[in-house]
Every structure is written in structure tokens, then in C-alpha cells.
Amino acid sequence: KACTNHSVSLSDPLMALLIAVTVAGNALVMLAFVADSSLRTQNNFFLLNLAISDFLVGAFCIPLYVPYVLTGRWIFGRSLCKLWLVVDYLLCTSSVFNIVLISYDRFLSVTRAVSPVMQGNTKQAVLKMVMVWVLAFLLYGPAIISWEYISGQSIIPTGECYAEFFYNWYFLMTASTLEFFTPFISVMFFNLSIYLNIQKRTKLRLDVFHEVHNQSFTEEMEMISQSMTQRFRLSRDKRVAKSLAIIVGIFGICWAPYTLLMIIRAGCHGHCISDYWYETSFWLLWINSAVNPVLYPLCHYSFRRAFIKLLCPKKLKIQPHDPLQNCWNWFEVSG
């Protein structure tokens, strides 16, 4: 994903801050998962998988790219260049596929009322996680490794590090469809389906409320009990819907510019897109890895409680009933 002209980059402090936030944020998610056994549900396994890929982006991909930006040359040799490219494409793609998996899991739990037990056990969750990594590797890995041998020559100048297919429009269009367009449309579909499902259930709940007054006392008590259960589940599903709406928005903001500019740049061999805009869109992909720990686990009650347990254990003992869901308060009021 690197370009040959590094005229535009983040400042040194910002690059260091991005690395620190990405590593620390995702490390906290993984530590919480290890320290708190209550987090080890199938749903949260997918969040862990996302945190692993984003952590490696901050721990491996960005640090190796920083000297490339500062010096304008790749100083680590061709072998490490290929390894870096394979890992970078693998991690960014797996991050996208993990978002789709998380969204699909939430879609099932809301629209199909599928419980974690019905969705499968831990082994099935781990299998899905492994499949994410395998598919992410197959999308770009073989092409990065073998492209120059199949074409018979390398087009990468000495001191540069980018994929051999960097200007191959047909390959990039196909890969982008699988890496961005299809996942984005899928997440949009899941989000819209959840929204429509909640709207329908809200209307039905209001209809039931009006019918309660026409029933006998026993029937009225039974309907009220059912209504309270439905209200609790509806409230939970609304939070899920709002989180997925944020996922769609941030995912689109971080990925759409890079994907579109990459395709256009390949079509005109870099002559119609300024390096400034391409480089800016490139950094957005990595910024997404720093934002993900905030978007997903931090806004879940169980993860926030685990974070406080790790970082401020005394506060948790003093305020065992502290309202940890404040991150949703604004949405609840506006919703």
C-alpha cells in the first residue's frame, strides 16, 4: 500500500502517538479478555480477533513504515519488504473481515433472535476466526509473493517497497470488491435489517400496550410480564443497532477514500491523483485500527467493567454500581 513518493506524512509525534494508541488500546482489549473469564463468549471472541489484527498493525506495520516515511527509502531489504507487505495487507483485510463477522453475529442475535448457544460453541467461533485469517491471506498474500515470478520481472525500483500489482487496475478492482465493496454492502445490509426489525417490534409493542387495558386481570399481568421482557430485549437491541451504525460510518470514512483513490490511481498509473491525497487516505486505514478499540469493546458494559478492573481496581471496589454505560447515554437521549 506504500507509494513511491513520501512527500506527505504525519509528523513524528503524531506517528508515535498513533503507534502508542493502537498498541495500548488493543492490548487492553486482549488483556481484559484474558483476565476476565466472563468476557469469553462467542460474540466477544470476534472482538478479540479484531483486536489481535489491529494490535499487530500498531506493533509491526506502522513502526516499519515510519523510517520509510522519514528517509524516503526502504532500508530493510527486499525480503523484509515482502514480509511487511504480506503482513500489512493481511492485517488490514482481516480487520475488515472481522468487522463483517461481528456485524453478522449481531444481525443474527437481533433479527433472528439467535442465542449464543444456538449460534455454536467456542470451537465453531475459533474456526470462524481462523477462516477470517485464511481468507484475508489468500486475497493478497499469494499475489504479493509470486507476482514478479509469474510476470518474469519486478517493477519495484531499488529502495522502494510496494506491491508488484500496484498499477494493475484489473487485479485491484477485483481485490477491492472483495476487500471493501462487498463487506461494506454486507455491513450496511445488516445494519438496515436490524433497524427495520427494531422499528417493527417497537410498533408491535405499542399495539400490545393498548390491548392490555381490554384484558382480564390475569391476562393483563401475563401480558405486562411479557412486555417487560420484550422491552428489555428491545432496549439491548437498540444499543446493538447504534453500535453497528457507528461501525458502518467509521468503516466507510476510513476505507472508502483509500479504495477509490487506489483504483483511480492504478487506472491512470499515478498521474491523476496527487500523492498528498493518496498518502492521507493510506494513513486512514491505520487510524481505523487505533479507533476500533473505542468503537467496539469500550462501549460494551462487560468490557468497560473489565478495563476498570485492570486499570483502576480500587475504583471498582468503591463504586461497584458505577454507571459504566455512560458512552451510550447520549445515544439513548437522542434516540
Image: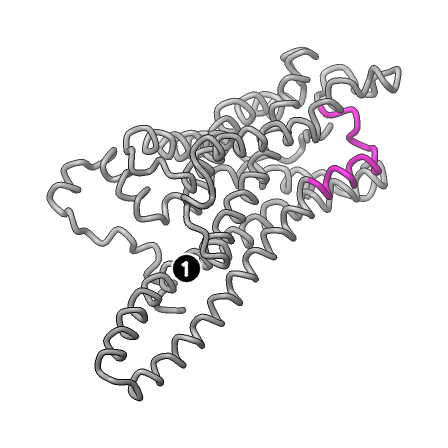
Q: Quadrant of the C terminus?
A: bottom left
Q: Quadrant of residue 193?
A: bottom right
Residue at 78% x, 39% y is 174
| Residue 32, placed above or below residue 248 | above
Q: Nearer the viewer, residue 248 or 241?
A: 241
Query: What amino acid does circle 1 point to?
Result: Asp
According to the picture, the residue beneath numbered tag 1 turns out to be: 237
Image location of residue 95, percent across then percent down? 55, 36
Which residue: 37% across, 39% down? 41
- The secondary structure type at the circle numbered 1 is helix
Residue at 24%, 40% (x, y): give it.
Answer: 308
- In the picture, the quarter occupied by the N terminus is top right
Q: Is residue 154 above or below residue 198?
A: above
Left or right of 33? Residue 48 is right
Q: Image check: 330 left or right of 321?
A: right
Q: Magenta segment range?
A: 162-178
Question: Which residue is at the far right?
Answer: 152
Q: Is residue 171 magenta?
A: yes
User: At 47% across and 38% down in the image, what residue appears?
Assistant: 46
